[in-house]
Amino acid sequence: MSDMESNPASATTDNIEAPESVQHWADLIRDWNASSGGDHLIPVGRCSKPGLSRVNRTEKTESASITARRYSTRKLSGILQYDPSEFTISVASGTPLEEIMAALSANGQALPFDPPRAKLGATIGGCVASGWSGPGRWRYGGLRDFILAASFLDGLGNEVHTGAPVVKNAAGFDFPKLMVGSLGRLGVLTRLTFKVFPQSIEPQTWVVRCRDLASATMHMQTLTRLPVELDAIELCQPGMTDPDDWSIVLKVPGPQAVAESIMDRVQRNVGEADTRRLSEDHAEKSWSKLLHVEGDVAVRIPMTPRQIETVVQTFPSELTERGWRMHFGLAGNVLFVTGSGDLQVLDSWLIEHGLAGLVLNAGDSSTHGTQMGMWRHDEVVMRVAKAIDPRGRFAPFQFGERSHTKRREA
């Protein structure tokens, strides 16, 4: 296996082959078993999230020496259909997010789930495959709520068209939503359709500074229950937005009169906690940091707000001493950690606390794959994967053992 294949974090799309068309992709998949040498296929976009194209190895699979080869969808690019009056847009899967967002912005529209890493070259297909929505998910819903249709190539090289480019559609098995978070393990996305929203008007960024974690989590929970619409609620440890305090970062919708009314309500409910509005420059830098989650190593970990204090108190001191940072997105429903070095310590901590993580970035020295921690068995996904890819051409998911198997052995 080449260095590019073994260390995907260090690769760029320049050294990854990109089939010219959907037909070339179909031919590649159909001929895969004869030309792959036993490797699996992993489709990628422009490698803005290189950790998601790593291969997982377990005790059962290490001996089989599972390897993978990546191919880029960057040549499947372009806006295929867009009528602003219909509030839907259809695009090829390799289209850069920045191109899509610019076209929507020119018509006063946006993808309200804040797709991450657009400025790092992320594609719309990679966004769907990662299942990663940004801070805007708090108010508007996640990527899964906006995808209407998806076309993809299955493990036999057949192009499958699912969903419909209309806002109201509830017919048949919802394959478009199944492809959200599929990590390229279920097929090669070729075309995607989304519903879009009007852009938020003159949003403001405010910070609630809290003296400690306990008061920060209490105030954050209070804000989530207020009858006001906040575009985003993120919780940052000291040193990220504020040098000394835990900070709740709020995106407040405009115009000015609306923002003032919302913040008046917020200030009455957080008591003596200091609230201040960030300048446009400071706000842009803060949201860039929270949206893109950049670092030599970056991991996304679903959780619940009730786990915040336990997570902070038990987080490995070894990683903290090495400068690892964390912030809680979506009002505490997801944890992002960034740092440098190998992932073994973090993996052990995740398993100990029953958490699962997706590796967005991984250092060259890391031996971990995309999925880490405690992944539970998902029989539905496994059966769908077998039906879509009966010959196992795409890289496999990592799931835990079936629970009924464990009970029978016990």
Image (cartoon, grey):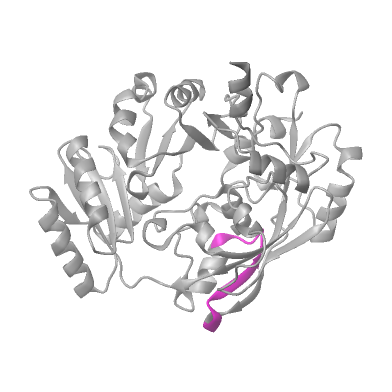
Residue found 36% across the figure and 53% down from its top: 287
In the displayed structure, 143 sits above or below 379; it is below
Residue found 54% across the figure and 50% down from its top: 131
Find out whether residue 371 is within the magenta segment. Answer: no
In the displayed structure, 78 sits above or below 237; it is below
The reply, left or right, for residue 178 in relation to residue 106 is right
Find out whether residue 91 is within the magenta segment. Answer: yes
Image quadrant in which the N terminus is located: top right
Q: Position of residue 335 (x, y in %)?
A: 40, 39
Does residue 15 appear in this view? no
Query: Which of the 4 image quadrants contains residue 367?
Result: top right
Q: How many marks?
A: 0
Does residue 160 appear in this view? yes
The reply, left or right, for residue 330 in relation to residue 2 is left
Q: Position of residue 14 (x, y in %)?
A: 69, 47
From which residue to which does the magenta span run?
A: 85-97
Residue found 55% across the figure and 73% down from its top: 167
Q: Position of residue 370 (x, y in %)?
A: 59, 35
In the displayed structure, 174 sits above or below 343; it is below
The reply, left or right, for residue 248 in relation to residue 406 is left
| Nearer-the-camera pick, 120 or 391 | 391
